[in-house]
Amino acid sequence: MREKRDAENEGIPPLAKVLLLLESLVGAVDTIKINVESLTLKTDRLEENVQKILNHMDGQVLLVESLKKKVAGSRVEAHGVHAIWKEAPSVGVPRVSDFQHVVEGLEEKFRSYTEKAQESQRSIFQEQETEKIARQSRSWNLRLVGIVENEGEDTTEVVRAFLNDSLKVSSPQFEQDFLVGRLDRGNRLILIKFLSSEDKDVVLGKKSMLKGQKVWIDSDLTPRQVEERKVELQKVWSAREAGWVAFMKNDIAIVTSRKREAN
């Protein structure tokens, strides 16, 4: 075949042969260009795919880090859930009924605590009402201790005479008096129930006249009032020890800003 081509070319002038060769070379170059462009396009696509893969991998890394944080942040919640699981009467993974059992138990405890709180509130209210009634019923009473008694004497007349002679209170109006204790055990407590708070306040306001007579007269206080007075008296004593002028008024400690004079 080569011999045939050579035979065909024997009649072609040299310049024509060169031109023919150049055309052949140009065609080869064009083919190479096309192949290079195709390869370049494939390379670009490959780079894009590689970049997509890298981006996807970065997203996966971020997702993993996020999951790690969520797992770390959920440990406390997991402990709480584990505690609920322990209370649930089941083995393995708890069922909805197990959680329902725990919730019902908590609701029962809440109801029990609520009932106890309400009962305590009612009890406190009743105590307050009882204390209020007791204070009202005692508000016109006075307690008198230290009067000398003799067998067979009328206590009411003895009290009237004492109030008139020692406190200069004439014709005090009181409903009745009560003796507390036994005569053979010394001077007894006499509870005087006045008809008005005015007479009671007049007598109480003159109790300083009994100083040195070993006779004491005071308001008829409830046990709670006695404790409250002790607290107020402690405030007065503490203030006086610190050098301040302090005194009791209407069973309330009054601490002034004045210093006590040194004796």
Image (cartoon, rainbow, N blue to C red):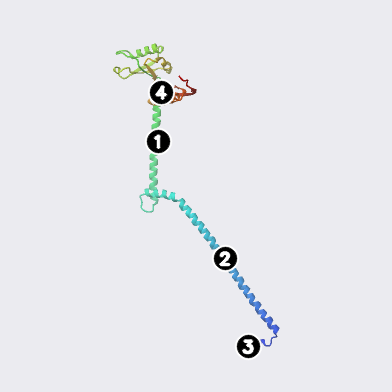
Relative vertical location of residue 12 with respect to residue 181 in this rendering, above or below: below
- Sequence-wise, the earlier of marks 1 and 3 is 3
- Sequence-wise, the earlier of marks 4 and 3 is 3
Front one among 246 and 122: 246
Q: Are marks 2 and 1 in contact (CB under 8 Å)?
A: no
Relative vertical location of residue 19 with respect to residue 178 in this rendering, above or below: below
SS at circle 4? helix
Q: Which mark is residue 136?
A: 4
Residue 154 position, x and y percent, is 32, 13
The amino acid type, in three-letter code, at marker 3 is: Lys
The amino acid type, in three-letter code, at marker 1 is: Gln
- Sequence-wise, the earlier of marks 2 and 1 is 2
Residue 37 position, x and y percent, is 62, 71
Front one among 2 and 116: 2
To which residue does mark 1 refer? Answer: 118
Q: Disc 1 to disc 3, how far (Cα)?
A: 123 Å
